[in-house]
Image: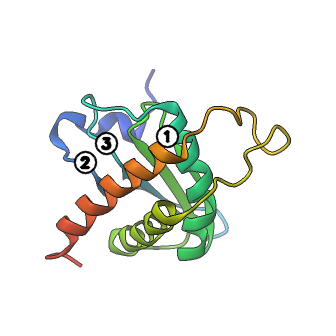
Amino acid sequence: MKIVVESFTMDHTKVNAPFVRKCGHITTPKGDIITKFDLRFTQPNAEAMPTAAVHAIEHLLAGYIREELSDIIDISPMGCRTGFYLIKIGETSEKEVTLALMNALKKVINTEEIPAVNPVQCGNYRDMSLFSAQEYAKEVYSKLEASAKGNI
């Protein structure tokens, strides 16, 4: 296969999670800018989040991240279960996305329920854990906060 997939070009052994990384940028034929971000929660090849945590975080961030950033197209879990991809319209800095993610994670930590946990709105509604989602949110938030103190 000769197609270059950006995520396969990153050396997963040389990164330290958690982090936010701008990993894609295109301009459409009509001139719109689409930007993709790697929201890495856990260390690649060292820790994968359980599916129930990933699924709950996906549902929670679907709303909470949109309260923090405009023009989001999608936030989707990575197949490796170490994070999420955020795709949005327009130019946005890693700093802006990091701050938005941190604000959204605060909401995850303090929430009391996961939205759309029913067979009508979700294709696997039984496989979610609010407790696990909140534990990962706490861990990622505290590490991002510690690393951001000198950078943001």
Badges 2 and 3: C-beta atoms under 8 Å apart? Answer: yes
Work out whether mark 1 precedes mark 3 in sequence or the reverse, and give the earlier one: 3
Residue 42 numbered tag? 3
Check disc 1: other Cα within 10 Å, few if <14, some if 14-19, many if 20+: many
Work out whether mark 2 precedes mark 3 in sequence or the reverse, and give the earlier one: 2
Q: Is residue 122 visible?
A: yes
Residue appearing at x 30%, y 32% in the figure: 47
Percent x, y of residue 61: 56, 58
Residue under numbered circle 2: 17
Q: Is residue 33 visible?
A: no
Badges 1 and 3: C-beta atoms under 8 Å apart? Answer: no
Check disc 2: other Cα within 10 Å, few if <14, some if 14-19, many if 20+: some
Q: Nearer the viewer, residue 135 or 80?
A: 135
Residue 115: image quadrant is bottom right
Percent x, y of residue 71: 62, 71
Relative to 12, is 120 on the left or the right? right
How far apart are the alpha carbons under marks 2 and 3?
A: 5 Å
Q: Nearer the viewer, residue 89 or 122?
A: 122
> Which residue type does callout 1 highlight?
Ala
Residue appearing at x 57%, y 45% in the figure: 56
Residue appearing at x 39%, y 49% in the figure: 135
Dot in front, 1 or 2: 1
Work out whether mark 1 precedes mark 2 in sequence or the reverse, and give the earlier one: 2
Q: Which image quarter holds the C terminus?
A: bottom left
Residue appearing at x 82%, y 37% in the figure: 119
Q: Nearer the viewer, residue 92 or 80?
A: 80
Residue 53 numbered tag? 1
How far apart are the alpha carbons under marks 1 and 2?
A: 17 Å
* 84 over 68 or under it: above or below: above
